[in-house]
Image: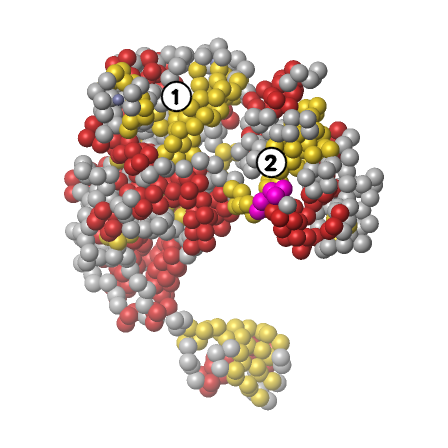
Amino acid sequence: MEERYDFRKVEERWQRSWQEQKTFKVREDSSKPKYYCLEMFPYPSGRIHMGHVRNYAIGDVVSRYKRMRGFNVLHPMGWDSFGLPAENAAIKHGIPPAKWTIENIAYMRDKQLMRLGLSYDWDREVTTCLPEYYRWNQWFFIKMYERGLAYKKLSYVNWCPSCNTVLANEQVEQGLCWRCSSVVTHKELEQWFFKITAYAEELLSYCDKLTGWPERVLTMQRNWIGKSTGVEADFTVQGSGERLTIFTTRPDTLYGVTFMSIAPEHPMVESLIEGTPHAEEVRTFCQRVMREDKAERTDEKRKKEGMFTGAYAINPLNNDKVPIWVGNFVLMEYGTGAIMSVPAHDQRDFEFARNYGLPIRVVIQNAEKNLDPATMKEAYIGEGTMVNSGPFDGTPNGTGKEKVADYVERRNMGRRTVNWRLRDWGISRQRYWGTPIPIIYCEACGVVPVPEKDLPVRLPEDVELTGKGRSPLSESRSFRETTCPLCGGKAYRETDTMDTFVDSSWYFLRYCSPRESAAPFDKKAAGYWMNIDQYIGGIEHAVLHLLYARFFTKVIRDLGLFDGDEPFQNLLTQGMVIKDGAKMSKSKGNVVDPDFILTKYGADTARLFSLFAAPPERDLEWSDQGVDGAYRFLHRVWAVVYKNIERVRDVRPAGIEARGDRLYRKTHLTIKKVTEDIEREFHFNTAISALMEMVNELYDYTSGGVEERQLPVLRSAIDMLTLLMGPFAPHFAEELNASLGNKVSIAHASWPTHDPEAIIASEVTIVIQVNGKVRSKVTMPVGSPDREIETAALADPKVREYTHGKPPKKVIVVQGKLVNIVV
Ligand SMILES: [Zn+2]
Ligand SMILES: [Zn+2]
């Protein structure tokens, strides 16, 4: 052991050793319990950021801890490596996306992740942009196509008329093209979809079984799936007689409809406005709204805007004629794309009605409120009695819901229905850097899936990326032109590629047998490793990625490849890394580059800081002092071990016979605390602060020199401290572990357990009162006889002051607590 802690030497040595010894390589072993720990894999942008460091440090502590607890731990890493940035880099700098991506991966793996000392089994690395991986995306697509779970339909895309190209949502910046700043329009294209809605009910009901997930994430998933039960009612358009169907969860308010609102995307907009004087104005309005972000459009705080189409609808219940408006807050994706507006009982409708001077009609009256449309300040959404509702007047609205629904069904005005917010998953991307969709179009045979034996459909390399024109693959004749697998005739390939969320929907299964070539994964291996015991990633993936992965898992189950319903047993969504009050981002200029921290302080300090500064689920505020503090702590541990190592090297550690010793007790208290904090929701911050306290005790204990008889206790304290630090600062702990003469890597050492006997307090503090007033305290061994306590109390100098040395009238001893001396 060297005198000074030189993190460069230490970290390099152990990283090399782990690699050479394949310390973290795992295989199935039925004799051991398994543990599958997974962090969401990164996009290889070229550099990791502090958020990654935090994410992987958390996962690494969990993995290392579980390994020391005797689990067979699967802890893999890979690359979510298809996607837009590679394509953009190609457009800007002319680098082929494959080259750019593979170089980024090499840098991030070898120069960044390797340097963090993460305990991955690198032999299981999965890279989604390689044909050996994406061929299985294509295979899944075909299986889903055969089962009707992959289908094609017309759908809107963002379209830049001047680049003449489809834009991804992230390429639309405030309604403008990211390249040329033209106004983005919408265009209908044939798109491929996965029928996730076929699993809506199961995806929703299983939310109740995911007890290891944060409630917040489950709520987001439930809302996203959005099941609501209600009634579809058929209004008719006056004049044309066209049917305009609306969905409502409040059939009890059907008599209160004073206008209709339809989405700007609604297919009937054109027929409603055609030939009217303000047709053009409405068209312009619709185009403008359609360019806006949908989440923003429905934001509660957003101003509700609309235009009258000039057409009217007839309410089937009371034959009322109500105007049909186009509203910016109505989305085609929800319900039927048309809603009935009941301003008296819906706040959004209320604001809209007030804004445009539309009538308000109360149909749920509350005796205490005495609602009057003329004076109402807001919509009334509470309980009440139905009024202005024809045959239902006087009915409490709770039961009225069912009665109106019955009435609507009986008279064929509509039907009860369940509505889902969840839409099918559009997977077509008019991009190059993704998985080609394995479909061939033949004039004679129609849509023909690529036969399994012809997979993978490889991405061609002769594609020039300009960012303009049609989908890049459609420009490659060698790719596009093919022969029909059925009739041998001339045919064309699908030139769209898949959404990259497909790649991340099953990669966790691939890790179980990453080199499998006859199937996406080996069923037996997946049977051993799945489910993922702990999944860790950012809250930004709470909905899409996690929902798609759950969907894929269920489809894979139904294909007979996997016996399980859900992939992720426990989920931890870690907080963000923030600096100066904001998330680290280039645009804010508050980014701390992990490379800088690794070079200046080393990986163990970076890990320790990011684990110590906040519990994992909370945001972590970056602090330079915090980093310094972590660095100093490691130096402090090093120094105290170095000072004593020669004397303790050949000493047998103390056992329970040392139970009276304060360092021995502190050691066992620390083992208990650290273990409990890790087990209790991974509260690494308090675990680390317990280690710091133990180190303080170690300094105290050794400050005045250590006697020979104290060496066994000192040795056991240093041993335990080393083991407890293993998951947090692994290089550092390996170095101490080796210096103590241990030959086996600390990664495979056993996690210590505390001895309950060692932490029972050996002394007790007893309060001394004189005439009922607290005057002093005395420390006694636990279980001392009353006589000894009395003697000690009377001998106390403060007590003597108050008793003036006279013999007491009476002494009362309350065992283990206090002594009262009456004089
Ligand atoms: Zn453009
Ligand atoms: Zn054919």
Q: Nearer the viewer, residue 463 or 154?
A: 154
Residue at the image position 73 percent from the left and 33 percent from the top: 321
Residue 247 placed where, x, y %? Answer: 60, 40
Tell me the amino acid under the disc marked 2: Thr
Which residue carries the number 2 mark?
A: 245
How many numbered discs sit on the rendered protein? 2
Based on the displayed image, in which of its 4 quarters is residue 603 positioned? top left
Q: Residues within 10 Å of mark 2 (few under 14, many from 20)?
A: some
Q: Pointers 2 and 1 in contact (CB under 8 A)?
A: no
- Point out which mark residue 11 bears: none
Q: Is residue 635 above or below residue 181?
A: below
Residue 129 placed where, x, y %? Answer: 28, 28
Q: Nearer the viewer, residue 587 or 609?
A: 587
Is there any visible trace of residue 54 in the rendered image?
Answer: no
Q: Which residues are magenta?
A: 412-416
Q: Is residue 395 magenta?
A: no
Q: Residues within 10 Å of mark 1 (few under 14, many from 20)?
A: many
Which residue carries the number 1 mark?
A: 430
Tell me the amino acid under the disc marked 1: Gln
Residue at the image position 52 percent from the left and 14 percent from the top: 181
Instruction: Classify mark 2: helix, strand or loop.
Output: strand
Residue at the image position 65 percent from the left and 20 percent from the top: 273
Residue 674 placed where, x, y %? Answer: 37, 57
Residue 272 placed where, x, y %? Answer: 64, 23
Inter-mark Cα distance, 2 to 1: 33 Å
Instruction: Classify mark 1: helix, strand or loop.
Output: loop
Q: Earlier in the sequence, mark 2 or mark 1?
A: 2
* Magenta stretch, overall SS: strand
Q: Is residue 132 left or right of residue 39?
A: left
